[in-house]
Image (cartoon, rainbow, N blue to C red):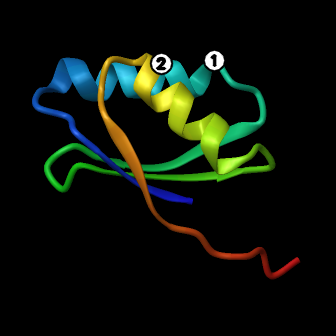
Amino acid sequence: LEFAVQMSCQGCADAVRAALDAAPDVKLLELRPQEQSVLVETTAAAERVRELLENSGCRAVLKGMGGSSE
């Protein structure tokens, strides 16, 4: 899943990382604060991941999703 996340500083990026690290079913693949982009691999619903991201204090919206090749 790829999310657009409003991260205005490194503190925001750190909060997003901490929020996702706390979820065992979410694997952070890429965190790009300059592009305001977060890429995760998960078995959880997209809405649950969005809620985790927003619990960090940043607004988030789903940009896209792809299937697994497995």
Please tell me how crowded label 1 is: few (under 14), some (14-19), or many (20+) other residues with Cα within 10 Å: few
Q: Which of 9 and 55 lies nearest the eye of the viewer? A: 55
Find residue 47 and report its horizontal and vertical position in percent.
Answer: 62, 42
Judge left or right: residue 52 versus residue 67.
left
User: Which residue is depicted at the point 77% across and 36% down?
Assistant: 25
Q: Is residue 7 above or below residue 35?
A: above
Write down the quadrant of residue 5 in the picture: top left
- Residue 18 — which label? 2
Q: In the image, what residue type sits under mark 1?
A: Ala
User: Which residue is depicted at the point 31% across and 34% down?
Assistant: 59
Tally the numbered discs: 2
Q: Which of 64 and 69 lies nearest the eye of the viewer? A: 64
Find residue 35 and report its horizontal and vertical position in percent.
Answer: 18, 56
Please tell me how crowded label 2 is: few (under 14), some (14-19), or many (20+) other residues with Cα within 10 Å: some
The residue furthest bottom is 69
Callout 2: helix, strand or loop?
helix
Callout 1: helix, strand or loop?
loop
Q: Which residue is mark 1?
A: 22
* Labelled pair 1, 2 in contact (Cβ < 8 Å): yes
Judge left or right: residue 38 versus residue 52.
left
User: Which residue is depicted at the point 11% across and 27% down?
Assistant: 9
Name the quadrant of the N terminus.
bottom right
Q: Which of 33 and 47 lies nearest the eye of the viewer? A: 47
Name the quadrant of the C terminus.
bottom right
Write down the quadrant of residue 51 in the picture: top right
Find residue 7 and report its horizontal and vertical position in percent.
Answer: 20, 34
Judge left or right: residue 37 versus residue 3.
left
Give the Cα separation between the discs numbered 1 and 2. Answer: 6 Å
